[in-house]
Image (spheres, rainbow, N blue to C red):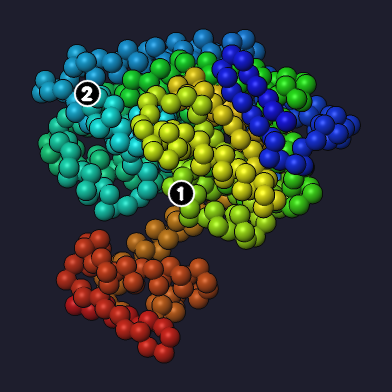
Amino acid sequence: MKFFDPKSEFVLSLDGFETVTDELLESQATAFLAKSALAMVEKIEAGEVVNTTAHPTESEDRAVDHYNHRMEASPVAGKSLADSIAQWNTIKTEIDAILDGKTTTPEGKRYTDVIFNGLGGSFLGPLMLVISQYGDEFNFESGLPVRIHFMSNTDPDTYHLLFNKLDVATTVMVSMSKSGSTAETKGATDAWTALVASTGLELGPHSMAVTTPGSMLDKFAQEHKFLGIYYMATETGGRTSIGTAIGMVPAAFARIDFADFLRGQGHMDAMTRRPEIKQNPAMLLAVAIHQMTLMQGSKNMIVLCYSDFLKEFAHYLQQLYMESLGKNYHVDGTPAVEGQTVFGGVGTGEQHAFMQQVQKGLRDCFVRFVHFAKRSGDLDNAKAGSVGRQLLAFIKGTEAALHQNGKEFITCTYDEPTPFNIGMMVALEERVVTFLACFKGINAYDQPGVQDGKLAADAMNTFSKDSEDFVAKAGFKGTADDFVTAQGKAVSFETRLMAEAFLSDLTKNPASYKALAGFKASRQFVDGAFSYSVEK
């Protein structure tokens, strides 16, 4: 079974997914699911509050607007394709002035480097977008007048290497955060602020922000007169924010046709509103995955992209699917155990890491193939005729082997890696997630599990600072449990974990604890546990 879009030449093939039959697609049960899912899309696009769950810890109680930003006729005022393109044109004009050397540093120098500082969708989306146009070596391949860098993981080694490589005087950091309070992004912003100050430069000409109006980051940016401040809506979730200023600013620096990307998203959205199941590619995909889950249980989704331009697409889908569908409550507040595990990578290289198990081992997965039909160039290959033909042989050979081993797969073929087609790719997956969440009766747009880790990290920071003050008074000798007890706290898994982490880190990274300068920390492993000593 196949779906074909004559305008874009997009092909969705379900030939390798035997659970999808005409009987299934024409059944009353499937018709009911499809009708309910399309009704949910109508509510979302009408601006209704759909990010809601009848459980106090789960619900954000807000509308969800990412579809509106690429709708030609949006019912929500100020949120339409025309509004998005108008914002894009403003951003593009201002950033073109930087790229062309018309906007310079206060010292009259051209900007040479831009750092994108974001987390989750504020990192994965922009990185995927840039690589989709230039490949992994974008600073070598693109010919852009600035070098592009991405920061996401809180890694002091990365900070140190990058900051020491750049000329701060000609670099701008773009911090991207809805609230500005996201610890990872704020940490990098704080580190950049300190670095700029240490050089005697003003922060504003070397900083830009993408955030929501009135946020902590917005106030900070206004105070320091950032070079540019661009806004997104509070109704836009991070993992679906690529169609907003989160994607626009990196696209402008990378000279990507973002208006074409938005039109591609809108084109796919139009197809995935169709009530006819066989003419709606997202509905076909969602029904296929849902039916397989009903018949065989939850399975991992392996995404194999046979193009280096799609190197980050599997990572992007990892967040989109797992953060949206990994829930422990239904929208009515009843308990649920839902999710969709995603992993994958670039086809012929990374598939060798796991294809043995996929083909011959556990029956715990299905495969998504994604590739482009057209090649921008090719090279001779004695065995296959050309390198491109060899790549095609690898794709079809892997599909044939999966079929022979009774493993299911789905293939998406896009014409070529243009912004329009990348927009279609992203929009298809966003709609599949919406449909699957509706089928399962869960809220796809909250992420309470992400907050759990952040709250625990805050607790660790508090414990660490309190512990630093405690040790500074008289030092310490003993185990992690002794350390917890000495501070008047109850020993638990959490407090033991934090004490062990603090004491171990102190022995390895004493320079990070300025209040303990002059102290010497050491540890010994005795009878299956560490004993610590911190003394002057």
Q: Gap in Å between the C-alphas at discs 2 and 1?
A: 32 Å
Dividing the picture into quarters, in which one does residue 2 lie? Answer: top right
Query: The residue tagged with tag 1: helix, strand or loop?
Result: helix
Residue 83: x and y, percent? 50, 12
Dividing the picture into quarters, in which one does residue 217 lie? Answer: top left
Looking at the picture, tell me which residue is in the foreground, 446 or 431: 431
- Against 92, is 144 above or below? below
Determine if residue 73 is in view: yes
Q: The C terminus lies in which quarter of the figure?
A: bottom left
Residue labelled with disc 2: 145
Q: In this image, 143 relative to 396: left or right?
A: left
Residue 192: x and y, percent? 25, 40
Looking at the picture, tell me which residue is in the foreground, 399 or 136: 399
Q: Residue 350 carries which label?
A: 1
Q: Residue at x 41, y 90 (%)?
A: 527
Q: Residue at x 34, y 46 (%)?
A: 187
Q: In this image, 301 relative to 249: left or right?
A: right
Residue placed furthest toward the bottom: 527
Q: Which amino acid does label 1 sit on?
A: Glu
